[in-house]
């Protein structure tokens, strides 16, 4: 039986909480896809966020569908925007930021450009995007889609996918894999300080992580 309504939302929230202390760089170690770099970079830094994706695809030059998408947002959502084509018109700015915060959105990931950078920074809303532009959009009514699979940074993002974003970048997580991934990542992250301490005490990193043996095997030699 599939959870619906408030029970489904609670389940997503619980799964998102699993990644609250996990860095995307750690998760990126075990993901073969879903790690958005370098196209999507953190331009407006903020706290680490993890939540369900509200997806929207926005036509070139047009921002009408994006305004409508914000009315469908639930508190805790992360807005994932596919700017169709390589359009240099910013589809995000001060007004959209205010609307997103009013809707309870906790982060925005844009395969496109933003403007009003000072206002976005002042708001404290974390935004990841491809860059900045003074060119803005209009209400042209070209179409677009809300709540369907989109391509963002070369990664397919489905509505409801978990999005983990921090200063390292953005990861997209299948909710069905969340518990397994979170456990693996937490263990890796917990082990890292011990490795750093061993290196500081003089141990060779290539011996700690096994790289030396691998390199010698590849070279067919016992010395470097």
Image (cartoon, rainbow, N blue to C red):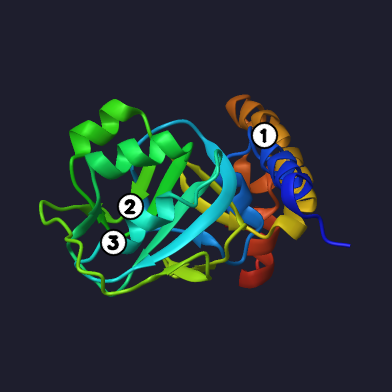
Q: CA distance from mark 1 to mark 2?
A: 33 Å
Q: Residues within 10 Å of mark 3 (few under 14, many from 20)?
A: some
Q: Secondary structure at mark 2?
A: strand
- What label does residue 64 carry, if any? 3
Residue shown at 55%/62% (left/top)? 34
Residue where numbered disc 1 is placed: 195
Instruction: Single out the mark in the foreground, 1 or 2.
Output: 2
Q: Secondary structure at mark 3?
A: helix
**Badge count:** 3
Which residue sits furthest right?
1
Find residue 65 and report its image quarter: bottom left
Q: The C terminus is located in which quarter? A: bottom right
**With respect to residue 203, does 3 lie above or below?**
below
Q: CA distance from mark 1 to mark 3?
A: 51 Å
Residue where numbered disc 2 is placed: 129
Instruction: Single out the mark in the foreground, 1 or 3.
Output: 3
Q: Tell whether 213 sits left or right of 157.
A: right
Nearer to us in this view, 62 or 204: 62
Residue shown at 89%/62% (left/top)? 1
Residue 162 in sight in this render? yes
Q: Position of residue 138 (x, y in %)?
A: 16, 61
Q: CA distance from mark 2 to mark 3?
A: 19 Å
Residue 39 in sight in this render? no
Find residue 57 and report its image quarter: bottom left
CB contact under 8 Å: marks 2 and 3:
no
Mark earlier in primary sequence (2, 3): 3
Q: Tell whether 65 sits left or right of 95.
A: right
Q: Tell whether 201 sits left or right of 85.
A: right
Q: Position of residue 135 (x, y in %)?
A: 11, 56
Q: Secondary structure at mark 1?
A: helix
Nearer to us in this view, 194 or 111: 111
Nearer to us in this view, 201 or 47: 47
């Amino acid at each position: 039986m599939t959870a619906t309504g408030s029970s489904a939302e609670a389940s997503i929230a619980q799964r998102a909480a699993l990644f609250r202390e996990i860095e995307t760089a750690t998760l990126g170690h075990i993901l073969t896809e879903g790690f958005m770099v370098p196209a999507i970079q953190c331009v407006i830094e903020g706290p680490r966020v993890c939540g369900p994706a509200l997806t929207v695809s926005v036509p070139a030059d047009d921002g009408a569908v994006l305004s409508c998408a914000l009315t469908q947002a639930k508190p805790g959502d992360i807005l994932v925007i596919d700017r169709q084509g390589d359009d240099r018109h910013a589809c995000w700015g001060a007004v959209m930021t205010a609307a997103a915060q009013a809707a309870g959105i906790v982060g925005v990931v844009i395969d496109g450009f933003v403007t009003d950078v000072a206002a976005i920074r002042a708001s404290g809303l974390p935004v990841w995007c491809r860059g900045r532009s003074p060119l803005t959009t209009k209400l042209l009514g070209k179409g677009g889609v809300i709540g369907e699979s989109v391509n963002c940074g070369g990664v397919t993002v489905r509505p409801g996918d978990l999005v983990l974003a921090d200063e390292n970048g953005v990861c997209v997580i299948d909710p069905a894999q969340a518990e397994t991934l979170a456990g693996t990542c937490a263990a890796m992250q917990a082990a890292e300080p011990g490795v750093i301490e061993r290196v500081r005490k003089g141990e060779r990193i290539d011996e700690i992580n096994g790289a030396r043996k691998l390199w010698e095997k590849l070279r067919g030699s016992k010395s470097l």
